[in-house]
Amino acid sequence: MNDITTTAAAEANALLFPEPESRWSDAQAATKSPAELLLYRSNLLGSDLTVTNFGGGNTSAKLEEKDPLTGQAVDVLWVKGSGGDIGSMKLDGFSTLYLDKFLATEKLYRGVAFEDEMVGYLPHCTFNLNPRAASIDTPLHGLLPFKHVDHVHPDSIIALAAARGGEAATREIWKGTVGWLPWKRPGFELGVQIRDYVAANPGLRGVMLAGHGVICWGDDAKACYENTIGLIADAARYLNDKLTGQAAFGGQVRPPLPAEERAAVASALMPRLRGLMVGERAKVGHFSDDPEALEFVGSKDFLRLAAVGTSCPDHFLRTKIAPLTLDPAKLEDEAYLAGALAAYREGYGGYYQRCARPSDPKMRDPNPVVVLVPGVGRLTFAADKVTARLAGEFYGNAINVMRGAEATGGYLGLPEQEAFDIEYWALEEAKLQRMPKPKPLAGKIALVTGGAGGIGEATARRFLADGACVMLVDRDGDRLDQSRAAFESKFGKDVVRSAVCDVTDEAQVIATFAACALEFGGLDVMVANAGIASSAPIEETSVALWNKNYDVLALGYFLTAREAIKLMKPNQDGSIVFIGSKNGVAAATNAAAYASAKAAALHLARCLALECAPFGIRVNSVNPDAVIRGSHIWDGDWRKERAGAHGIDAGAELEEHYRKRSMLKRDVLPEDVAEAVFFFASAASAKSTGNMLNVDAGNAQAFVR
């Protein structure tokens, strides 16, 4: 998107809310069963981010099913299960409950002080042994008498729900056909309140839930969907009328920097912030300078509204209740940044101490999730890239909510205790405890040069499989695109990026590492793998050939290591792995340029291990030999040259030669080298630096002495 301009015309026009339109297809719907219609409706709603957030909202239908025990027709409540996303879920994403059994649980309800125990009764209502756990919003759906129910949190709706004038606006927009209930935490009590409110006010098409969203219904799947879409569009039109011609958030007082400058500031700032965030595990960052963020951070009311915090539970469970705001004039001051992070943690600790009860979970990570910088944009940090990106998107939703709420009487955050009770809800804590143990490289960021080659691809694949984010670097753009696309398909688009880079070009190397910092927030592991190979008798070795080897294998390793160290120093941690060669320690016939350049790289690694140890950065080398399969180097002249040097055929005979030459009589594969690299990248080698590890199936000449 284009930058927000600083003209008077632009300042007088706030960003507007999108008005969703129905995407329902009668032709598609006609082929579906009742359960499939519920899924169709859910996917339509969830795939439209103007309707609901990722993972937010829930849908339900009360359907007639055949009881597997009695064979009788029974009413079954189908409702989105806990933790699902209605945009991407399948039928197995719904929990299914005997409706009569669920309704009978009300006689067990002991009041609001005990409502959490009601969740424990839901598994006893399960229909057909469905393992999908029911969500805490199940009572909102099950207690209402309507067959089809939607509960969503679009920005335009939350803007009204979080506004001082929200209740009056609801009456004005819908003329009494949509009700209003004050804030109540989701759960059984809220379900009872909604049911009783609807019973006392017949003819409603929905109810606005203060600070929370809207719940609405229909007689069939299509009617329910179109009711939901219509309510959101109504709210958007109302807010857009209010906002048209206005300067949002009191008007702009700090224009955004040009796009390139914003990116440069963010890429320099993120590794430093990441290094200042204390905790057991490293974090991954995400940067956004979308129009919402720039409009907000450059506004007159920015600091006031940021301090109020987010209102919708869906938002602050992802973002924490409030962000860290930074003064752009002080970003170069390390003491200022350290003090700002420390003050945020202290403030969060105070919030916990004021609100926590003896039975509440221990305080969680006190570091900020969202960091806002006027003129630059929004930075978010989390345990993994997906969570960091989603946190940024959710705070973008929160900004939209604040914009609309400010135009409707003023923005209201939740009371501090209510926010705490959501954040530290025992049911949320139980959900966190059920999450799988993090993978060994979770939160780690790796950069692999020569990433589109055999060893590079195998290494990247190993890192990604164990939870790391990876920046693939290669000078071959076509191969790089293919590698990235394959990894995206297997591991997801969030965790892999790529950059075309010639490691002998200083400017390209600097730009590549800056891009890594911008995309992921820093760097933990760098694998210097980009290489070439040449073979020629010394008298036939030209200066150009000699320099080419040294440019890639010595200069290239130096440049990439130098930039990696800059990004690793703020963390006081990191691992650099050089892909060396057996020829770096054992002389090779007709390969003086290649072998001596590899030897230079190996000695550079030892020098860097010595220099970087005070910063917690480890530097080690892996020395492969004859990794032929999957290697682009061996596809070229090197294969013929080495075969000629040994007086053998360049085909299968060459592989057989190297296999028989090894002590173990085994082929060395890219995956074998990747395992050694993974060892040096992981915590298993936390006390190892300055080492060489041979992966050559055994070669006495290459024994490290």
Image: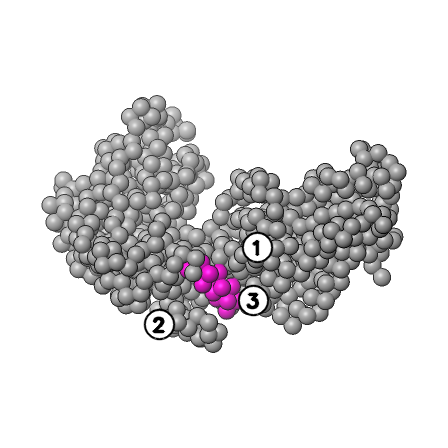
Q: Which residue is mark 2?
A: 354
Instruction: Magenta stretch: give its range.
Output: 262-276
- Identify residue type, mark 1: Gln
Image color mode: one colour
Using the numbered discs, state the Cα–Cα distance from disc 3 to disc 1 in whole angstroms: 24 Å
Image point 59% across, 62% down: which residue?
563
If you read the primary sequence from the N terminus, does the residue marked by circle 3 or circle 1 appear first? 1
Using the numbered discs, state the Cα–Cα distance from disc 2 to disc 3 in whole angstroms: 32 Å
Front-lying residue, 2 or 651: 2
Q: Position of residue 177 (x, y in %)?
A: 14, 43
- Identify residue type, mark 3: Asn
Q: Position of residue 201 (x, y in %)?
A: 13, 45
Task: For the residues labelled 2 and 3, say whether their Cβ atoms are less than 8 Å apart.
Answer: no
Front-lying residue, 457 or 510: 510
Image point 76% across, 60% down: which residue?
600
Q: Is residue 205 left or right of residue 49?
A: left
- Badge 2 density bin: few <14, some 14–19, many ≥20, Cα 10 Å: few
Front-lying residue, 664 or 244: 244
Using the numbered discs, state the Cα–Cα distance from disc 1 to disc 2 in whole angstroms: 51 Å
Q: Nearer the viewer, mark 1 or mark 2?
A: 1
Q: Which residue is mark 1?
A: 508
Main SS of residues in magenta: helix
Label annotation for residue 571? 3
Image point 81% across, 35% down: which residue?
650
- Badge 3 density bin: few <14, some 14–19, many ≥20, Cα 10 Å: many
- Identify residue type, mark 2: Arg
